[in-house]
Image: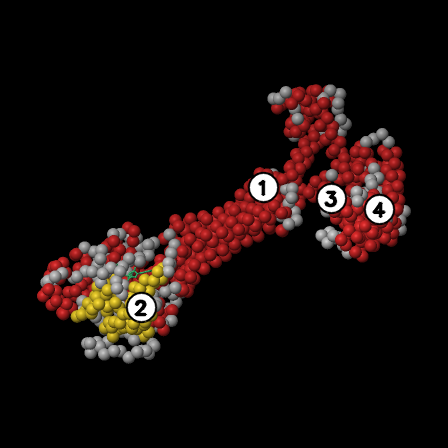
Amino acid sequence: MKPIVIQEQPRLSFSRTVWIAVDGIRYRLFRAAVTVAVIGVAVAFLMNILSESFIKRAVAANTRDRIARSRLVHQWAARLMSPGDAEGLLRELAADAPGAVAEAARFGGLTAAEAETLRATARRAARLLDFLGEINYARRRQLVHAYTGVDALGYLATADGERSFIETLNRTAAIRLPFSREELKALIADWPAARGRLDRILSGRRAAVARLAEARGGRSILEALAGAEGAFGDEIRAAGFAFDAQTAAPEVAAQARRELDTRWIERALDVRVARQMVAQHFDALPGDVTVMQLWRFVASESNAARFLEAMKAAGEGREGLTAERVVELAGFRREASALERAARLTVGVGGGWMGLGERLSWLLLVSMLVCAIGISNAMLMTVTERFREIATLKCLGALDGFIMLMFVLESCMLGVVGGIAGGLLGAVIGMGRMLAAFGGIAGGAMPWGALGAGVAASIGVGVVLAALAAVYPAFRAARLAPMEAMRVE
Amino acid sequence: MIAPAVQPLAAPVAERRVLIRTVGLKKSYVKKGILTEALRGLDVEIYAGEFISVMGPSGSGKSTFFNMIGALDSPSQGRVFIDEVDVAQLTAEELAYLRCQKIGYIFQSYNLIQYMTALENVTTPMAFGGVQPDEARRRGMRILEIVGLKERWFHRPIEMSGGQQQRVAIARSLANNPSVLLCDEPTANLDLHTGQEILDILVRLNKEQRVTIICATHDHRMMNVCDRLMWVRDGRIERIARREDVKIEIGSIGGKRDAAKASKEATP
Ligand SMILES: Nc1ncnc2c1ncn2[C@@H]1O[C@H](COP(=O)(O)OP(=O)(O)OP(=O)(O)O)[C@@H](O)[C@H]1O
Ligand SMILES: [Mg+2]
């Protein structure tokens, strides 16, 4: 007769459990593959959005920077041609550009302390102007009547203006000044003096502009700036502008020369032989030839040489312009249009969560949600459809811990495989799409570190979500008596 | 081991030990607000080493009774003692040990694990019991040979007929040499010949290894091999009788023709 002696069931070793879990996956390979695919797709979706966001962010920063730098010559041309107005000067001072304060002091004949006070006032004034620009028209009307820009500040500085402004502020709780009342008071008190100084600086500038106009004689400002590394640069500094000989001058000069050459080449379309040459190359009517076609035509050195030859023959030759230079200019032109395109495509990127901009952050949030729901749905399904199996295993003597461990291991394995596949796939698709959209700009600005972190994070998301989504139903089933688990639907 | 909570009642057969005892066993299910009483107060004593058949019409509560005495489900009321130990007092680990090592189950719906082969189904309880894989495979093949499925060890349940699945379920119940075998209609899907073979296996286990066998059945051949019979109706025990007494009745009344015929066929 067999006696019944009840002991404790031994725990299966970890490695045995791993083997049983692996066996389980092997037996249900197709089902596991489907689950992995679902996890993979969910993670790939998340990673795709993430990688595109990162790349767009990098591209946006990169292009903005480069576009700003490529406009340096235009900024200087504008500054040297006109003294500007009080608001422009105010913002220049508030923006804290290097040398701006010293330059203003020179033009206005201010002491260093006066210039410093002026800058502090300019900062406050700029903030107030920004604030007035952002609130709606009716409110602005209540606060400063129809005045705009520095005139609004002038109105505030009158006794009437100040009183009505403060009263409106007190009356309307919804209007929030971006700074304290004390600062407002200080600004209003300082404004008349500041305004006088601004005017003095402007008249100083006016004199400098006139002096430079004389110095460049009949040349256009671009032609003059093409020589900014030499005499004209000294002239600019002598007139009082903060035009750095080491950093600004060479760049401005190079850009000016490039601009002049570019304009000359584009004007070549007015020359009949050149137009015909391009038309022939593209098999188009001469009347339909565009500037972009011209640039594409001269991008090869042999074409560029032929082009220069023809122009010379037509009596329109240009000194010092070689075929290599033309090809180089075509390259610059291509780059510039790529930059413009990139800037257009990344409008709205920046700020928001992780500097991704509102649209991308929202997209990312939605993709995370979709990913989470997809993975937990897949895992919940695979576990709940196995409740009978869990019950049977319990009837055969499986411990609750074993069942939980088995499901956690299984879901981790599925999560790792799906996460790695999906993460890499999403990153590759994202990079491919961004390379197609931005070309070399994306290639150069590829944020490898952020992408790597993104892949790691999305694998982590895949594994953790899969494990969590499996643990909960497995725990529920393992806790029940076997036959109760069998009955759960 | 936990001390017996209740002193055994006076057993009808004095030298026999009570192995399983139920006291006021009740089980009810609530589904969609409707209460189904599957068991309405069962008091039974099953002796160590006996072969008892449980009979009763469909829906009378046989499977529910099995789940209770097999420690697979908890009763709504009443207690189950296995070897004088209250099952409700056992820890999860002890319950697992009991289910794994001491009780063998043959479920009415087999409950084989669909993605495992016949051999793996049989070796799973051994794995839980800590038997090494090689040893488990060897023993599994031997048991499959006993139930006549040695050649089909690599088949999955869906690739086997109902009867073959049933035999895998029987093989699995024998995996860890249990002390008690709970069989829920073990011959329901088998032809006469195979059914007889299974019965012979059960009888041999009972006689040679003194395994206690509790067997729900509609198969009247069971009457020829069991020690006692128990009739269940509507969740209550209708009657418990020794086989000798029942056979005399059937012989004298001759009412249940099929039953009489079946017992004649089976009796040499
Ligand atoms: N999960 C459940 N929910 C509700 N009622 C149930 C449940 N399981 C069983 N029952 C009911 O309990 C009663 C007993 O069922 P049980 O399965 O024990 O019958 P049985 O005697 O094994 O029948 P059969 O010979 O057909 O296998 C039946 O009336 C059945 O409807
Ligand atoms: Mg039943």
**Same subunit: marks 2 and 3:** no
A389 to A359, vertically: above or below: below
Q: Quadrant of ligand 1?
A: bottom left
Residue A332 in picture, x, y percent from top left: 68, 35
* Amino acid type indicated by mark 4: Gly
How much space separates mark 1 and mark 3, taking CA atoms? 40 Å
Disc 3 element = helix
Quadrant of the image occupied by residue B13: bottom left
* Amino acid type indicated by mark 1: Met
Could you tell me which residue is drawn at 60 percent across and 46 percent down?
A: A360
- The response on whether ligand 1 sits within 8 Å of label 1 is no
Q: Which residue is mark 1?
A: A434
Disc 4 element = helix
Circle nearer the viewer, 1 or 4: 4
Could you tell me which residue is drawn at 70 percent across and 32 percent down?
A: A329
Q: Is residue A485 left or right of residue A88?
A: left
